[in-house]
Image: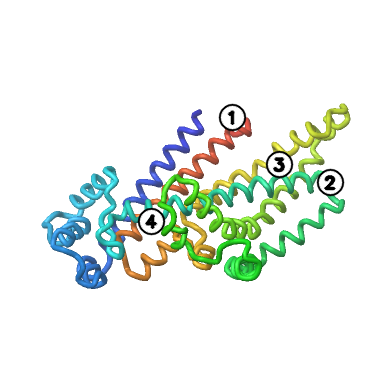
């Protein structure tokens, strides 16, 4: 428990530093950021929005830097991330919320499937090393070597353009003319059919890393004394594999946490190819339109996601490996 408390304090300090950097960076920029945003908005902002931007960036308010800093913290704790310039009059929180769950569902599900599938296959290949199962490695490595955007384009051409197995339309055409966006069978079915190809692209491009990592760890673990003793005692093969795989999977936990942490960031190239309106494409749009409040909000969301995923990995690691609970 002490280990987790210490790690939690470390992540709390990291989160504080990240939020502080997110505040001070715009204030260190030369010029007036509010005037830049008003110009990029093309005169679409009303006086109330201009005043809100001035309050957010501390321009013309007469407040000192530290007063602005604590005001920023107060707004942040209330969930107020400011107004989005490119999506005006929507707030940053609303804009991110409309894209975040699409990315979490698509990239998150694909990442979990890739990890579970790669770990299971890697454990089996490592157990049966030298057999015909080793032929899986060059095949999966081939898909991993192909760039994301090229693999996505090929899958889209083969299964949508030629075979017509999956829809060739973009994200915006989730049959919104026939279905209302929400938890109804028509919309869910349309959304799933549009998400299969992007998810398949992510799985094919990432599963090889999990297979190779798990396979190499299984090969090393199989030579450990406790595995040889378990085999000598005549334990069932499935139980021996379980004991070996339980220890071999430990290094993959940290890698899986890193993969999960970047789920929120989205798979930008895949989203662009399939016109999938997730957080990755939203970030690109925010950068192109110089929407600084939206960029700041996405930066914070990604930062907190990385910290939460790493804290989760530390917790799981402590539960799986008793050695981490012992003092040096």
Q: Nearer the viewer, mark 1 or mark 4?
A: 4
Distance, label 2 to label 3, CA atoms, is 15 Å
Which sits earlier in the primary sequence, circle 4 or circle 3? 3
Q: Residues within 10 Å of mark 1 (few under 14, many from 20)?
A: few
Circle 2 residue? 128
Q: Nearer the viewer, mark 2 or mark 1?
A: 2
**Horizontal placement of 257 versus 88: left or right?**
right
Element carrying mark 3 = helix
Q: Nearer the viewer, mark 1 or mark 3?
A: 3
**Horizontal placement of 275 versus 89: left or right?**
right
Element carrying mark 2 = loop
Which sits earlier in the primary sequence, circle 2 or circle 3? 2
Q: Nearer the viewer, mark 4 or mark 3?
A: 4
Which residue sits at x=57%, y=36%? 316
Total marks shown come to 4
Mark 1 in CB contact with mark 3 (< 8 angstroms): no
Q: Give the residue at the far front of this rendering.
A: 178
Which sits earlier in the primary sequence, circle 1 or circle 3? 3
Distance, label 1 to label 3, CA atoms, is 20 Å
Q: Residues within 10 Å of mark 3 (few under 14, many from 20)?
A: many
Circle 1 residue? 326
Q: Residues within 10 Å of mark 2 (few under 14, many from 20)?
A: some
Circle 3 residue? 248
Circle 4 residue? 298
* Image position, residue 235 (x, y; %): 84, 28
On screen, residue 277 above or below 180: below
Q: Nearer the viewer, residue 126 or 200?
A: 200
Q: Nearer the viewer, residue 112 or 317?
A: 112
* Image position, residue 186 (x, y; %): 49, 50
């Amino acid at each position: 428990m002490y280990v987790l408390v210490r790690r939690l304090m470390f992540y709390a300090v990291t989160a504080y530093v990240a939020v502080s950097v997110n505040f001070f960076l715009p204030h260190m920029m030369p010029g007036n950021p509010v005037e830049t945003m008003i110009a990029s908005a093309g005169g679409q902002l009303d006086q109330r929005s201009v005043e809100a931007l001035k309050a957010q960036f501390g321009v013309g308010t007469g407040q000192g830097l530290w007063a602005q800093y604590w005001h920023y913290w107060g707004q942040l704790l209330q969930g107020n991330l400011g107004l989005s310039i490119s999506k005006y009059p929507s707030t940053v929180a609303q804009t991110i919320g409309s894209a975040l769950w699409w990315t979490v569902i698509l990239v998150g599900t694909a990442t979990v499937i890739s990890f579970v599938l790669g770990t299971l296959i890697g454990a089996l290949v490592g157990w049966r090393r030298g057999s015909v199962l080793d032929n899986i490695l060059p095949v999966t490595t081939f898909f991993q070597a192909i760039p994301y955007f090229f693999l996505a384009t090929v899958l889209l051409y083969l299964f949508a353009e030629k075979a017509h197995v999956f829809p060739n339309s973009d994200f915006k055409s989730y049959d919104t003319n026939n279905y209302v966006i929400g938890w109804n069978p028509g919309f869910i079915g349309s959304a799933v059919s549009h998400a299969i190809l992007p998810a398949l692209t992510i799985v094919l491009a990432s599963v090889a890393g999990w297979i190779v990592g798990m396979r190499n760890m299984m090969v090393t673990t199989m030579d450990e004394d406790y595995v040889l003793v378990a085999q000598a005692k005549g334990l069932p093969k499935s139980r021996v594999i379980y004991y070996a795989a339980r220890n071999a999977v430990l290094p993959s936990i940290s890698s899986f946490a890193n993969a999960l942490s970047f789920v929120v960031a989205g798979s930008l190239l895949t989203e662009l190819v399939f016109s999938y309106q997730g957080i990755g494409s939203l970030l690109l749009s925010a950068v192109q339109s110089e929407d600084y409040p939206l960029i700041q909000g996405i930066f914070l969301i990604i930062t907190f996601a990385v910290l939460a995923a790493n804290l989760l990995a530390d917790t799981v690691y402590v539960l799986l490996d008793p050695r981490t609970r012992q003092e040096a």
